[in-house]
Image (cartoon, helix red, strand yellow):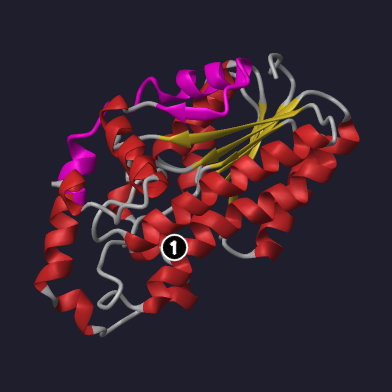
Amino acid sequence: MKEFKGKTAVITGAGNGFGAEFSKEAAKRGMKLVLADIEPGSAERTLKECKQLGAEGIALEIDVSLQENVQKMVKAAMDNYGTIDLLINNAGISMSGRIWELPPREWEWTIDINLMSQVYAMHEVIPIMLEQKTPCHIVNVASVAGTIAYPTTGPYNASKHASVLASETAYIDLKAVGADIGISVYCPGFVQTTLHHSHNDERRPARYKINDHPYYKSETYKTSLEIVNECIETGSPIDSVGMLIFQAIEEEQFYILTHPIYNALAGGRIQDMLSGKNPDLTRYM
């Protein structure tokens, strides 16, 4: 996909972080916008910035971890603009904790938003793109955590690995039917986003609320928050991310890996797997 002006972009998690940057870059390129976010007022705030850049669009306060909401989002896009040319599945959260300590409900939420929201959106949008028979593109935001097994982030790792594999399989399946639909999977390291605010009540659907579980009073939980906060706040600047992603779309680049410091970890993990070695904790120390 190389032409953007007048095309329609659907972007989830558009209220903050990556999503806001992608939205503004799409606006600069003359795209019509359908911006979705669960946090009250956040998608509308991003849309206001995009309108100042000359874009038109709609903002939806919506939880895309539910299939029926994704269907509503897609319907709104089609009702307003008639096409969907670019889909950016950005909505996501991060939860930390050892598998025997973290409540399973947190696993469910993480997988539903980091993986299933992308599955729902591709399921709904790809048939539309196939019917259009015009160049289209899908970007699934994963993480470098989708290539390694960083300690104490099991739900995040598992959901992001699944996102990478779902994206790879969709890419192969689309190539097999000769579709003019590109796919990219974005696997960044730490960037100065708002990912460390995943725990905020405004971002947590009511059905996933957990009140008095002992884990949230533990030192392990407090320490994990401190580590994540520091990693995000000292991560790479976010201001060039929008341009980077759109360049990858233009170049039909599938893997978007932006933090080469993690390449040795990812490569070492694959080498261990192929040589029959057990996972190596020392790689992460």
The single residue placed furthest to the front in the displayed view is 275
Q: Quadrant of the N terminus?
A: top right
Q: Amino acid at mark 1?
A: Thr
**Horizontal side, residue 19 vs residue 216: left or right:** right
Residue 203 is one of the magenta-drawn residues: no
Residue wearing tag 1: 110
- At 24% from the left and 61% from the top, the residue drawn is 152
**Horizontal side, residue 147 vs residue 53: left or right:** left
- At 50% from the left and 49% from the top, the residue drawn is 91
Tell which of 3 and 110 is nearer to you.
110
Q: Which residues are magenta?
A: 228-257
Other-residue count near label 1 (Cα within 10 Å), few / some / many at <14 / 14–19 / ≥20:
many
Task: Point out residue 202 in the picture as x, y percentages from the top left corner.
Answer: 40, 62
Residue 233 is one of the magenta-drawn residues: yes
Specify whether residue 88 is in view. yes
Specify whether residue 59 is in view. no
Task: Point out residue 133 in the picture as x, y percentages from the top left corner.
Answer: 88, 28
Tell which of 130 and 149 is nearer to you.
149
Above or below, comparing residue 241 to residue 171 in the picture: above
Tell which of 44 and 68 is nearer to you.
68
Task: Point out residue 30 in the picture as x, y percentages from the top left corner.
Answer: 65, 18
- At 78% from the left and 50% from the top, the residue drawn is 75
Task: Point out residue 105 in the picture as x, y percentages from the top left corner.
Answer: 41, 76
Question: For residue 232, which quarter of the picture?
Answer: top left
